Image (cartoon, grey):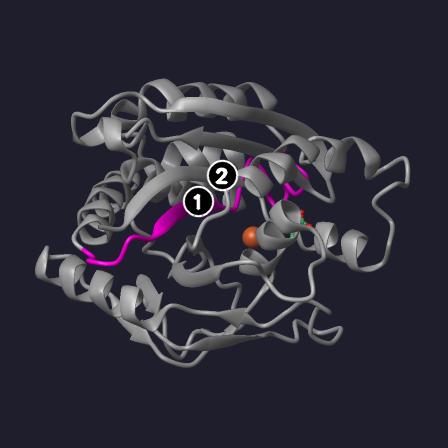
Amino acid sequence: MAKITASVYTSHVPAIGVAIDGGKTAEPYWAPLFAGYEPSKQWIEANRPDVVFLVYNDHATAFNLDLIPTFAIGTGAEFAVADEGWGPRPVPKVVGHPELASHIAQSVIQDDFDLTLVNRMEVDHGLTVPLSLMFGQPEAWPCKVIPFAVNVVQYPVPSGARCFALGQAIRRAVESFDDNLNVQIWGTGGMSHQLQGARAGLINADWDNRFLDRLIADPAGLSKVPHIHYVREAGSEGIELVMWLIARGAMADVAGGPAPTLKHRFYHVPASNTAVGHLILENNV
Ligand code: DHB
Ligand code: FE
């Protein structure tokens, strides 16, 4: 049986990728941010997943106003790194797990969540920056990755409650896969940020930290927070945080199992225009 052993949550700012790729991580602006991910790199070295189910959002890279899937699962064998305007990031291609992805699609769609199947797409900073933060700069990513793209760019976007319920369906799907696989689920994006308009540059550290508290201890309650609270309190791009509820919904305690162990918590302002939040929760099953 495949098992979800842990969930990882992290922001995905493109400038973080530029800092890593350009060798700037020790610069005074960046050093405190990357110091916050050192324990995470050690943790993942000791807790290597076979597969990461990586919940992220596409930023008008693979999808655009022509086609906007709410939830899209990458069922392909590999995914190329997108050119977001300055050439593709110099990071390895992403190798998928078509068998597990197809099984999850089958199970989750039969569980009444309509997913879009994507056999070919390029992945942007939303997916590659979290990989770089956790794994550094390897020749090849050390595990398979199933990209799971959520529309949080063009309204209407899915509710926190829908994301939380979807996470529970994903957990059931993973646990009904025959192979013994160590699967981690990552929720990415956020925290507070707004990139445009009169409130550009908005950061709300109190709200972000309360979100982290509740994600750990009261995810069901947190999942009921309506969109307008995210946008008002955490800025227009703060809505990316609903994706963290998919990963949290896949943890064992949500289905009546034991509470997860908090292995790491980190918060840093700013990285570019964004408040960076990061958690690692280990399942106790
Ligand atoms: C920034 C943050 C994002 O989440 C994003 O997708 C693009 C830019 C930023 O802070 O610069
Ligand atoms: Fe983003």
Q: Is residue 64 left or right of residue 88?
A: left
Tell me which residue sits at (49%, 70%) in the image. 95
Q: Quadrant of the C terminus?
A: top left
Asked if the stretch drawn in magenta spans residue 75, the answer is no
| Residue 141 picture quarter | bottom right
Residue drawn at 57 percent across, 35 percent down: 43
Q: Tag 2 or tag 1, which sits nearer the N-term?
A: 2
Helix, strand or loop at mark 2: strand
Per the image, the residue denoted by label 2 is: 9
Task: Give the main secondary structure, helix, strand or loop, of the magenta stretch.
Answer: loop
**Residue 37 numbered mark, or none:** none
Image spot of residue 82 (x, y percent): 60, 74
**Magenta segment includes 191:** yes
Which percent across, then down, holds residue 96?
A: 43, 69
What's drawn in magenta, residue-wise? 177-202
Relative placement, left or right, of 268 versus 220 is right
* Disc 2 residue lies near ligand 1 with CB under 8 A: no
Q: Is residue 15 above or below residue 214?
A: below
Residue 241: image location, x then y, percent = 45, 40
Q: What is the number of the mark on residue 187?
A: 1
Q: Amino acid at mark 2?
A: Tyr
